[in-house]
């Protein structure tokens, strides 16, 4: 298993992801600095969370123009699995690998707490372990928004990966932490090899640290 984690100025979850991948796969990922321009053979690329470039201009906008992202886009288009977590999700949207936008939480405040999500697509490599999962969120701009046409497209093509739900798997307004349209917590590209999600699975791989539901997403890919 050869995996890579992209590192930007301001990334702060890159090491968390590296620990998670090594713990689950037994193989440490290669850390790729944003100024690099190439990635050797990869079985999985992860764009981690954090505050790339201090979230200046717009979350993920500057990072999306980093030299390494051209290579990430090319690898994704060639079929390599790519996961963008939180700020990584924002970056993947800015590169147009994923549809829609991530705007300010409807509370207009930063949210950091545990939530529950459920998989809405059981056919992608990321969602085969179809469970109700508890994991943390930590974001200010995680409110998923899309035009009517875009929302119809991702629904018609089964591109909704995860929705916010309660602990029993019920999707309702009370379980939606940030105002995301239709409780969307994560989406896929049309070929289902790129996933973006706001919750942090890499922060939920140890029972002693609050839960290990996050490992199911990584195991789904690695297996």
Image: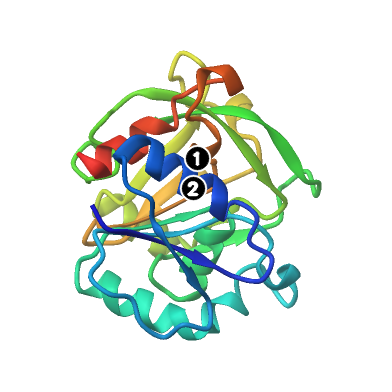
Q: Residues within 10 Å of mark 2 (few under 14, many from 20)?
A: many
Residue 129, position as x, y percentages in the image: 27, 29
Instruction: Determine the image quadrant of residue 61.
Output: bottom right
Q: Which mark is residue 223?
A: none
Residue 19, position as x, y percentages in the image: 48, 43
Name, please, the residue furthest toward the right: 109
* Screen quadrant of the C terminus: top left
In the rendered image, the vertical position of residue 99 relative to residue 65, given as above or below: above
> Can residue 175 be spotted in the picture?
yes
Instruction: Determine the image quadrant of residue 121.
Output: top left
> Can residue 120 be spotted in the picture?
no
Question: In the rendered structure, which disc, 2 or 1, sits on the residue that comes first in sequence?
Answer: 2
Tag count: 2
Q: Residue at x 52, y 57 (%)?
A: 48
SS for callout 2? helix
Q: Which mark is residue 17?
A: 2
What residue is pinned by disc 1? 202
Residue 45, position as x, y percentages in the image: 36, 61
In the rendered image, the vertical position of residue 116 relative to residue 81, given as above or below: above
Q: Are marks 2 and 1 in contact (CB under 8 Å)?
A: yes
Residue 66, position as x, y percentages in the image: 53, 83
Instruction: Determine the image quadrant of residue 79.
Output: bottom left
Q: Residue at x 54, y 41 (%)?
A: 200
Q: Is residue 20 left or right of residue 113?
A: left
SS for callout 1? helix
In the rendered image, the vertical position of residue 58 relative to residue 85, given as above or below: below
């Amino acid at each position: 298993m050869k995996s890579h984690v992209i590192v930007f100025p301001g990334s702060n979850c890159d090491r968390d992801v590296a620990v998670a991948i090594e713990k689950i796969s037994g193989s440490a990922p290669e850390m790729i600095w944003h100024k690099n321009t190439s990635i050797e053979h990869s079985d999985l690329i992860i764009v981690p969370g954090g505050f790339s470039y201090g979230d200046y201009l717009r979350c993920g906008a500057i990072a999306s123009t980093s030299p390494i992202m051209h290579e990430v886009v090319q690898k994704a288009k060639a079929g390599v699995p790519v996961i963008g977590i939180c700020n990584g999700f924002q970056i993947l949207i800015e590169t147009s690998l994923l549809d829609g936008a991530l705007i300010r939480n409807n509370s207009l405040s930063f949210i950091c707490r545990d939530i529950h999500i459920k998989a809405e697509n059981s056919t992608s490599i990321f969602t085969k372990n179809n469970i109700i999962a508890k994991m943390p969120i930590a974001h200010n701009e995680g409110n998923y928004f899309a035009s009517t046409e875009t929302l119809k497209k991702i629904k018609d093509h089964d591109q909704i990966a995860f929705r916010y739900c309660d602990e029993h798997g019920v999707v309702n307004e009370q379980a939606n932490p940030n105002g995301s349209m239709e409780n969307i917590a994560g989406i896929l590209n049309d070929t289902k090899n790129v996933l973006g999600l706001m919750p942090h699975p890499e922060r939920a791989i140890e029972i002693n640290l609050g839960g290990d539901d996050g490992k199911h997403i990584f195991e789904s890919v690695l297996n």
